[in-house]
Image (spheres, rainbow, N blue to C red):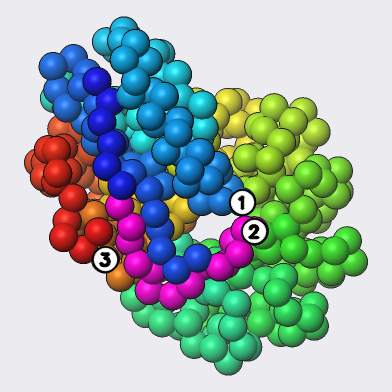
Amino acid sequence: MIRYDPFSLRLSSPLGTAAGRITDRKGFVVRVEADGHRGVGEAAPLPGWTESYDDCEAALADAAAPNGDDAPAPDDPAAGVDVATPAARHGVELARADALARAADESLAAWLADGSPAGSVPVNATVGDASIEASAAATREAVDAGYEAVKVKIGARKVGEDEERLRAVREAAGDGVELRADANGGLDASAAERLVGVAADLDFAYVEQPRPASDLAGNAALRDRGIDIALDESIAAVGIDAVLERDAADVVVCKPMALGGPVRTRDLARRAAADGVEGVVTTTIDGAVARTGALHVAAALPDVPACGLATGERLESDLAADPAPVEDGRMVVPSGPGLAGAAFDPLRREGGLPDSE
């Protein structure tokens, strides 16, 4: 049985996407019955990353139709999940995984892991596009709050200004803080060469998506320069097979909401690791259900680095109280059965959405 209800969460500030600026995160709370338990998931499409809202709703409707999901495998949330689009599939697979982990009396991380999962996951702070002074101030604020990893957005300004921003962020961070830069595919070849070189000189850990998603050759050419190259948008655009075959990345950024669910994301990260490519788990600015699911995926991976999960503050309202708030730059993984024990029980019930939807 698959059921779903729409929600809309106001963002604290507009989010720029490939499809334009958005002020709300709209999606669906998904409920699935499996192995005698009800699980909850979240399907929040983000145009430019996944399907549209209308296509997500249509995919959920198809999956919920009679005979659309009659015989799910009792022990595998990926088997029997016939959902056409990634965000919708994520909602269904996460809900089913939640139900099966609850039936096994395990946390979702323990259910996903090959061995014992991490009890907490380090997370990075994100410094958005801002002036040189504001970027440095935001970095100092993050470090003071206990973050040991900070990611700064680049690519929206002139290359010289971004170079100075990288220098200011390094000075503000001081020693012992891992720094990352994220261009979201927005750099031309010349700017990418220059900023990757600067970031390497400043001992940044990696530059994320310096060249456009489809330009695997351009991204691959930036490797082996004293700094790692991470790919994010490329994973959704061309697939992990192409990225690995072209040796285009040292790190892959895995968004369960764009990849079709927690099991798919775990398997993708494992495959990348087998090729010597590190996996980092992030969100697409999601509600508490999807963020918690992504945290469990990260905890199920061995030796996971800081992940991009500290995004709850981007929402003015949420689906539920956050069961895993950021404290001193880490998120503690809920240990109760499924996603977070009873924390999401109201959402598992019909009509259980908060009044702020």
Residue closest to the far right: 190
**Where, quadrant-wise, is the C terminus in this rendering?**
bottom left
Point 74% across, 63% down: residue: 186
| Marks 2 and 1 close (CB-CB < 8 Å) | yes
Q: Dot 1, how many residues are within 10 Å of its Cα: few (below 14), some (14-19), or many (20+)?
A: some
Residue at mark 3 to residue at mark 1: CA–CA distance = 23 Å
Q: Which residue is mark 1?
A: 48
Q: Is residue 8 visible?
A: yes
Give the mark nearest the N terminus, 2 or 1: 2
Number of marks in picture: 3
Q: Which residue is mark 2?
A: 18
Point 24% across, 54% down: residue: 319
| Amino acid found under the numbered disc labelled 3 | Ser
Q: Is residue 12 rendered magenta in the image?
A: yes
Give the image location of residue 199, x and y in percent.
71, 68
Is 326 displayed left or right of 138 in the figure? left
Q: Dot 3, how many residues are within 10 Å of its Cα: few (below 14), some (14-19), or many (20+)?
A: many
- Residues drawn in magenta: 7-21
Q: Label 2's element?
A: loop
Give the image location of residue 242, x and y in percent.
74, 31
Which of the 4 image quarters holds residue 356?
A: bottom left
Q: Which residue is mark 3?
A: 317
Is 137 displayed left or right of 322 in the figure? right
Give the image location of residue 29, x and y in percent.
28, 42
| Marks 3 and 2 close (CB-CB < 8 Å) | no
Give the mark nearest the N terminus, 3 or 2: 2
Q: Is residue 330 visible?
A: no
Q: Label 1's element?
A: loop
Which of the 4 image quarters holds residue 41?
A: top left
Which of the 4 image quarters holds residue 168?
A: bottom right
Point 86% across, 43% down: residue: 217
| Amino acid found under the numbered disc labelled 2 | Ala
